Image: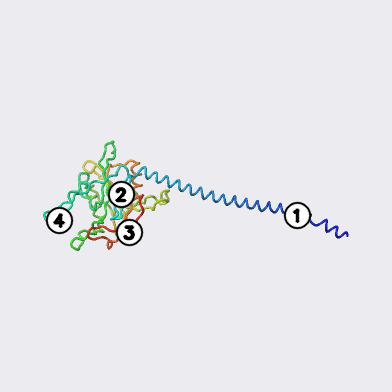
Amino acid sequence: MNMNRAMQESAPTPYSNRKLVKKSTFLQFALIVLSAMVWLGCGQAKYEERLQASTEFYEYMETIERNLASPIWERSDLGLKLRLPIPFKVPMAKPETLQDEDGNTVPGPDSRQPQELLGIELPGIVEAWQAFLPGESGEQIDSRIYVLTNHSRFKLTDGALTQEPMEFMDDLEAELATAFDVIIPDGEANQVGDNIRYGLTVPPSGSPNSKFINPKRYSVIRFLSADAESGPPVQAVLYEHFAGDIQAAVLIIGPKSFTSQFRQRIDLALQTFSVSRQASSQMNQSTGTATPSGGASGF
């Protein structure tokens, strides 16, 4: 009898059972709430990260729209694209097509050539643009942007090449060096300077813009005459880009000193320059053109 009473007294009552159940339920609920808070915290962090990335990309595209002309210039037959820095926009007129005495088609005079500015003829002009930029004294300087390539040198005449495609950039540099009466040393220098060759990557590796567009590598020469009296009253900056067998360049001729705004626009424009890699075997050797086989997308 006493033993039964002791067992009854030591056994949990229904009320005690309810307390244990409530405590267990509360702990389970607390764990669920805590897990939800952790999950929501991670989700919130990812959301904020994506929102920040979207904001940065939107700001980048806004910068592009404010500083570069629309629409993007493109030569699909050559696999070339470029957005021009404002105020450059409308291409200069191409030479007329004429016929010689034998009825052969020949190009007429090319008014795009910088004869008056530099006294030379540039090889491989694909397109040219003209605008007026402010000089050091505020005067408006006749300025040009050229896209130049070796595409036309792959064209066969009577079954043979008339000019070596792989020597295009050397020939272009030689013409500009003659115009400015300078000698360009071999190799690339470790720092930026006049009348030397140096490397440039745009956008720079690790910069915010490199998250939105693949960096492009250029070899750059800034041609500037040492003789202010008799030399050209302008500078010429040559941006060389190599893509397989294709040698392409953006050449900018303008005032001896560009404004900081225009320099920023040049950097942005170079980020949009797209050159498809074309092997000589892919070129249409009757026209010097090819079907594009890739390249960075345009804006």
Return the residue found at the far top: 138
Residue lying furthest right in this view? 1
Marks 3 and 4 in Cβ contact (< 8 Å): no
Residue at the disc numbered 1: 17
* Viewer-side residue, 8 vs 47: 8
Q: Is residue 258 above or below residue 186?
A: above
Give the mark, 1 or 3, whose residue is nearer the N terminus: 1
Q: Is residue 250 visible?
A: yes
Sequence order check, earlier mark of 4 and 1: 1
The label nearer to you, 4 versus 1, is 1
Which residue appears at 35% of the width and 41% of the height?
261
Residue type of the residue flagged with mark 1 = Asn
Q: Quick check: can you spot residue 235?
A: no
Identify the residue at image location x=26%, y=48%.
128
Mark number displayed over residue 73: 2
Label 4 – label 1 distance at C-alpha: 107 Å
Q: Residue type at mark 2: give it.
A: Trp
Between circles 1 and 3, the one closer to the viewer is 1
**Disc 1/disc 3 C-alpha distance (Å):** 76 Å
| Residue 60 in picture, x, y percent from top left | 41, 46
Q: CA distance from mark 3 to mark 2?
A: 18 Å
Q: CA distance from mark 4 to mark 2?
A: 31 Å
Residue 104 image label: 4
Extreme front residue here?
14
CA gap, disc 1 and disc 2: 80 Å
Which residue, given by chain and number where applicable, does mark 3 sit on?
293
